[in-house]
Amino acid sequence: MTTRVYVPTTIDGLAGFVLEGGIPEAAVRFEAADESEEAEYAALMGAADTSAELLEGPGKRVVVVAETSDPDGAIPMRLVVAVHADTEDDADPDADLAWYATQEIPDLLPEV
């Protein structure tokens, strides 16, 4: 059985996950109370609120979504199913996040 988890982070945090090949076991994560759309949305927005707290100055809220059989363990990037992020820095904290497919993750990251 797999569990969908929502991991709050920032753009820099997402870059770190990509560089390391996954999400560490210590990362904060949210789970929906059940499989309803409302519960999934509540978990997503709870993660978005925590993401906002991680920002040090202007930035975008980012939530990584993964499906894993061990919701408390490290999560390899291959289990990430989507990323939700603000489309601009300092977006309205009540605004919905945009959805990005996993192949779009490099487009979210700063060029180095």
Image (cartoon, grey):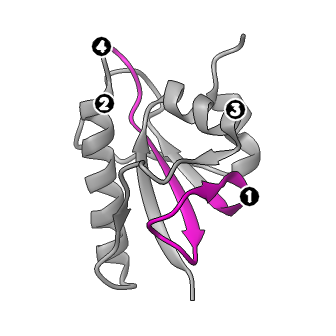
Residue at label 1? 78
User: Of the residues tagged 4 and 1, which is closer to the observer?
Assistant: 1
Residue at label 4? 57
Q: Provide the secondary structure element on which disc 1 rests.
A: helix
Residue at label 2? 54
- Image position of 112 (left or right of 38): right
User: Of the residues tagged 4 and 3, which is closer to the observer?
Assistant: 3
Q: Residues within 10 Å of mark 4 (few under 14, many from 20)?
A: few
**Residues at marks 4 and 3 touching, judged by CB atoms closer than 8 Å:** no
Q: Amino acid at mark 2?
A: Leu
Label drawn at residue 65: none
Q: Quadrant of the N terminus?
A: bottom right
Residue drawn at (44%, 66%) of the image? 72
Q: Earlier in the sequence, mark 4 or mark 1?
A: 4
Residue 91, can we see it? no
Q: Which residues make up the magenta segment?
A: 58-81
Q: Provide the secondary structure element on which disc 2 rests.
A: helix
Give the x, y percent position of residue 15.
61, 29
